Amino acid sequence: MSEVYTLRIPAELKKRMATLGVEWGEEIRAFIEARVRQLELLRLLEEMEARAAKRRTRIDSTQLIREDRER
């Protein structure tokens, strides 16, 4: 099922768009889909960073490596 989203643009812009012979509905739909995917990925990255920040250790990794090599 689909929904209708109305967009108001200046008359001059609509005239310019009409001269280009582009399927603007398809162009706008593709742009919105790509932008939504991009924003979802950004949100996912932010969530992952927040989770990673909670799991970070407060120990210097070089110290752990040195201890492991000495064993």
Image (cartoon, grey):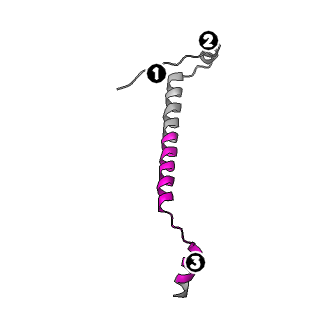
Q: Quadrant of residue 17?
A: top right
Q: Residue furthest bottom?
A: 71
Q: From the viewer's side, name the closer residue of 47 and 4.
A: 47
Q: Position of residue 67 (x, y in %)?
A: 54, 83
Q: From the viewer's side, name the closer residue of 35 and 52.
A: 52
Q: According to the image, label 3 marks what residue?
A: 63
Q: CA distance from mark 1 to mark 2?
A: 18 Å
**Precedes in sequence: disc 1 or disc 3:** 1
**Precedes in sequence: disc 2 or disc 3:** 2
Q: Secondary structure at mark 1?
A: loop
Q: Residues within 10 Å of mark 2 (few under 14, many from 20)?
A: few
**Three-letter amino acid code at disc 3?**
Gln
What number is the disc on residue 11?
Answer: 2
**Which residue is at a point 51% across and 40% down the rendered structure image?**
39
Q: CA distance from mark 1 to mark 3?
A: 58 Å
Q: Is residue 71 visible?
A: yes
Magenta span main SS:
helix
Residue 1, compared with residue 52, is above or below; it is: above
What number is the disc on residue 5?
Answer: 1
**Three-letter amino acid code at disc 1?**
Tyr
Q: Position of residue 63 (x, y in %)?
A: 57, 77
**Three-letter amino acid code at disc 2?**
Ala
Q: Residue furthest front?
A: 58
The span picked out in magenta is 39-67
Q: Position of residue 47 (x, y in %)?
A: 47, 50
**Which residue is at a point 54% across and 22% down the rendered structure image?**
24
Q: Secondary structure at mark 2?
A: helix
Q: Residue furthest left?
A: 1
The reply to whether callout 1 and callout 2 are in contact (CB within 8 Å) is no
